[in-house]
Every structure is written in structure tokens, then in C-alpha cells.
Amino acid sequence: MPAAADPARPLVIAIDGPAASGKSSTAKRVAAVLGIRHVDSGALYRAATAAMLRRAPDETTWSEAGVLDAVHGVTLEPVDGTFRPLLDGAPAEGELRGVAVTSRVSVAARMPGVRTWVNAMIRAAAASHPVVVDGRDMGSAVFPEAAVKVFLVADPHERARRRLVERQGGAPALAEVLAEVEALMRRDAADAAQTIEAPGAVRIDTTRLTPEEQVERIVALARGVAQG
Ligand code: CDP
Ligand code: CDP
């Protein structure tokens, strides 16, 4: 059951789950329906990784101090109801979502100092505004007091299919889906220690849901909390 909201704090709705379970697109739409902001913690881990990658392409040479120096070039810009990370003042969406960052992001995300930096950026964004935040540990580690905590899951084949449709459009071939399942499972394993379902989180399996249905369920949870 969702916890009762503390009226002294801006509302936090925390949506966690594994890669491609639907967190970011769902969080963005829930925020739009409720008229509040969306904050994507994964985008910040990606930005830290991209900033470091610009300096050193071989992730086996990366140190926590090196990544924490590189993140001085990362800022968050409010845009269209969400926050977009900028690298050296400029948007870099393609770079953040590209395979070079995606295949290395777990390395940076396992560094405790990098997690502290991301969490401080997220808490600052949520300090004075109600937000929907999404990631792996928003409801467990960063906002344990969140009024609504959701953990999204979906079948790996369905997650892989969605990622491919998003990336290239149209129905993907089976071989492509299987290769993407492997990539997702590798990243799930690399992120396992950081992916923590919060006690009391509402688990929603999105495998057979439409995006609209999962948005409606979370909006209903948020409205339930608001009504006490
Ligand atoms: O969208 P997708 O699930 O593919 O990834 P993301 O949410 O953009 O997150 C990118 C990476 O950031 C993940 O693979 C994790 O390594 C890391 N991450 C994390 O450690 N903790 C979070 N709260 C969010 C993301
Ligand atoms: O943030 P995360 O990696 O968990 O997922 P995402 O970036 O929101 O990507 C999920 C993709 O699956 C998006 O293209 C969604 O439109 C799509 N999708 C979904 O999220 N839920 C469904 N029930 C069906 C499709």
C-alpha cells in the first residue's frame, strides 16, 4: 500500500524497474497527467558516462575521481515537463542513448561517489517541486519517503521487442530480438546490486498492458494518496 503523503514535502512518485520495463515513458506521461515534473535518474548516469567517455574511451581505465571530475560538465535543463542533461552546455540525446554509453553506463553507476552525485542532482530537482522520478533505486534508496512507489517489470522478450521498435520502428526479426534480450540480461546483471524494489512498492507487470493502462494505474495510486 502507498504511504500517506507528508503535506510538508512536495509529492514524490518513484517508479523503478529493470531496463526497458517502461519506466521513463510511463513516468513522463504520469507527470504530464498530474501536471508535475519528471526526473529521469538513468539519464544522469548516462550523462556522467558520456562525459567520461569523451575523455577516455576505455572504461577499464576509469576511476571514480575521473568520472566525478568529468561530471562538472553536466547540467540539468528543465524542458517540456522533464529535465534534460546537457554536456558542456549542449544537448546530447543521441550520444546518451547510443550503444557506447549504454554498454558502459553500469561501470560508472557502480561507483559510490557517482551515485551520490546523481542522487544530489535528483534531490535538488525534487526539493521545491512535486516530481515523478524513475530509475532503479528511487523508492528504496533516494526517496524512501515517496508517497507512491511502483516497480515495473516485463518479460525480457517483450522488453527487447519494445527497445527495437523504439530504436528502428516496425516489427523486429527474431534474431534481433534474441540479441537484444542478451544485451538487456547482461545489463540487468550488471545493475542487479543497484536495482532494489522498495518495501511496499506496488509491482506492475507491463508485459500485457498498454502504455495507457500502466499510466492510468499509477495516476490512480497518486490520486488515492492525494485523497488520503
Ligand atoms: O532506460 P534504461 O532502463 O535502458 O536505462 P536508464 O534508466 O537510462 O539507466 C541507464 C543506467 O543507469 C542503468 O543501466 C544503470 O546502470 C544506471 N542506473 C542506476 O544505476 N540507478 C538508477 N536509479 C538509474 C539508472
Ligand atoms: O525507462 P525504461 O528503460 O524502463 O523504458 P522506456 O525508455 O520507457 O521504454 C519503454 C518502451 O516500451 C517505450 O518505447 C514505450 O512506449 C514502450 N512500451 C511501454 O513502455 N509499455 C507498454 N505497455 C508497451 C510499450
Image (cartoon, rainbow, N blue to C red):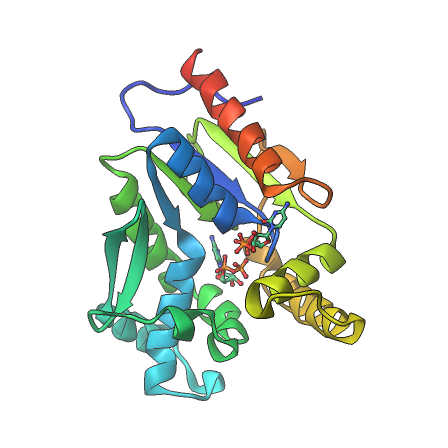
The image quarter containing residue 13 is top left
Q: Residue furthest left?
A: 89
Compared to residue 119, the image places residue 145 above or below, namely: above
Residue visible at 54% across and 35% down in the picture: 215
Residue 44: quarter of image: bottom left
* Image-based side of 99 in relation to 43, left or right: right
Q: Quadrant of the N terminus?
A: top right
Percent across and percent down for residue 106 are 52, 68
Q: Nearer the viewer, residue 177 or 183?
A: 177
Q: Quadrant of the C terminus?
A: top left
Q: What residue is at 49 percent from the left and 21 percent from the top?
A: 3
Q: Is residue 71 left or right of residue 201?
A: left
Q: Is residue 192 above or below residue 219?
A: below
Q: In the displayed structure, does residue 77 sit left or right of residue 166? A: left
In the image, 94 versus 66, the foreground residue is 94
Question: Going by the picture, which residue comes out furthest to the front?
Answer: 170
Q: Position of residue 94 (x, y in %)?
A: 41, 73
Q: Position of residue 5 (x, y in %)?
A: 40, 20
Q: Is residue 140 visible?
A: no
- In the depicted view, which residue is nearer to us: 212 or 132? 212
Residue 61: which quarter of the image? bottom left
Residue positioned 48% across, 50% down in the render: 24
How many marks on residues?
A: 0
State whether residue 115 appears in this view: yes
Residue 144: percent from the left, percent from the top? 45, 35
